Amino acid sequence: MFHWLEKHPFFFAVGVFIAIAFAGLVEILPNFAHSSRPVIGTAPYSTLELAGRHVYIKNSCNACHSQLVRPFKSETDRYGHYSLSGEYAYDRPFLWGSKRTGPDLMRVGNYRTTDWHENHMKDPKSVVPGSIMPAYTWLFTNSADIDTTYAEQLTVAKHFSVPYNQDVPMKDGSVKNVKMAQSLAEAHEIALEEAKLVTADMKDQDVKDAVNRGEIPEIVALIAYLNSLK
Amino acid sequence: MNKLYIGGAIFIALMVVLTYLSVGTSKGGFNGDIVNMLAIAGAIALVTITVFVVIKYVRQMQQDNATGELANESWDGIGEYKNSLPTGWAVMFLLTMVWGMWYWTIGYPVNAYSQIGEYNEDTAVHNAKFEVKYKDITGDRLVEMGESVFLAECKVCHGINADGIDGKAANLNHRLDAASVKHVIENGSNYQLLGSEMPMPDRNGLFNNNTGALITDAEIEVVSHFVANGMSGEGADIFIGACSACHGEDGKGMEYVAPNLASFTPALVVNVLNHGKKGIIGVMPKFDRLNDKQKEAVGAYITDISK
């Protein structure tokens, strides 16, 4: 048979292709498995949450905080269920981080609250004595960048089929429909509506006033993002 | 031919001398140190074997002639001898194929290591140990466990002393603040602190039976301080009139109806841990990932420190 193959280059090439394609299949096929699809309960980021994610990246939170709970008893006791690959479906880029100077934030929305984050960002030592995290006071005055956020939403919805304006299944059997605006002006409106929900639980009067004026301080967006991490 | 043997002998001697110089003169030398002895023995063996193998093949290259039956094919004038497979190689090849089939069908899928599998086993072992060790603890030991859970999970908001860090969270050293009581009277409550009771109405549903009218601002102020003071001071009559129907005359609550306002109870704490709550200060998230014993322990601890 090998003599025959050596005399027929075309069929030899087909054989080589099959051998190499098999190796490719072994690597490619698992990506279509159910377990690597978005986990049920994972929804795209809303406009304000995505703006908060930009604030998170801009301030390099991921340099000190990971977003990856490893499957160890000590970690799941502290942070909750270990991370699943399908939970990062809408993270572009993912923010696993490489070092934990501070604690993991993968599920921080489950056990910290809006007003706690507010106190903590203003003065970390006021709630965590001995904390080495710096205060992030400028978040209370800088405005979140909704324009870039909307551009990102449009891009990922169009090119990566991120299911905005579609029903996404949640863990309790319900569906969640994350709104994406049809115009930039509407994106600002949607973000502002979300911001009002966050500031309802906040204490800082300057931030509340800013939101009532129609501005969105970065802290509001960041808290919306942190609360969405579950 | 003789040159080969002489060269090989010189090479062996040279390597042995070099080994001696580097090892034999070091601390301990060959006498006191078994590792040095082994090193020199290994070095001699390696060098000798290498020299003999090299000499064998060099001689073969010098002396051998090509013999054997040629295969039919000729590739641009280059022929190939028909050599049968070396037996040892052929056997290993077949064994590798058998092993490959075993590994593909059984070896990997059935016996493979899984990080999640190890996690599940670890967790099961830990939980079983926890269950055995802490199943029957009560009293002070339960309070101690509650304190350790509190320091791990709760102190970040409620503070190390459970004082709420200057109003950033509820002060758990006493049952209620006047501001909280006032907030609940004015806005009602649907926290289900007992798990299943009816929601408490807001001020538009609270009648003071003493006056036969809705509770007034002044009365709310007075009764809030009465409850916050641990059911003492001015305002007992208002409490009897407006609150005691559900919360009991002593404020200790009624099962399935209304929670205890005089002191924390373990059941109340466990319910807050299970469902979270939203009050005048803000939202408390639920901590239902604690196990039942840990929740019970936190309940015992809070009850203990708020006495």
Image (cartoon, coloured by chain):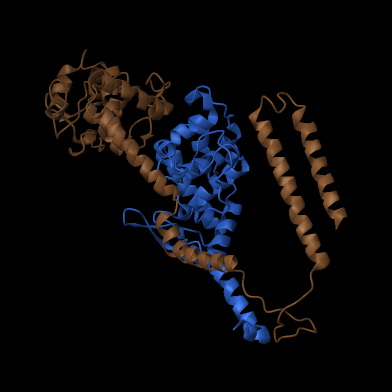
Figure disc tally: 0
Residue, x 53% and y 69% (percent of image)?
A: A25
Residue, x 72% and y 41% (percent of image)?
A: B43
Q: Is residue B276 visible?
A: no
Q: Residue furthest front?
A: B2
Residue, x 29% and y 23% (percent of image)?
A: B302
Residue A83, percent from left and from top: 45, 47
In this rendering, the answer to whether A89 lies above or below B24 is below
Residue A71, percent from left and from top: 44, 44
Q: Quadrant of the N terminus of chain B?
A: bottom right
Q: In which quadrant of the rendered view does residue B229 lie? A: top left
Give the colour in which the image draws chain B.
brown
Residue, x 69% and y 31% (percent of image)?
A: B36
Q: Is residue A209 visible?
A: yes
The residue closer to the viewer here, A31 or B19, is: B19
Q: For this view, does B185 lie left or right of residue B169? A: left
Q: For this view, does B171 lie left or right of residue B49? A: left
Q: In which quadrant of the rendered view does residue B209 lie? A: top left
Q: Which chain is blue?
A: A
Residue A40, percent from left and from top: 39, 56
Residue A226, percent from left and from top: 48, 42
The residue closer to the viewer here, B60 or A61, is: B60
Q: In which quadrant of the rendered view does residue B187 lie? A: top left
Q: Residue furthest top?
A: B233
Q: Quadrant of the C terminus of chain B?
A: top left
The residue closer to the viewer here, B36 or B59, is: B59
In this rendering, the answer to whether B28 lies above or below B4 is above
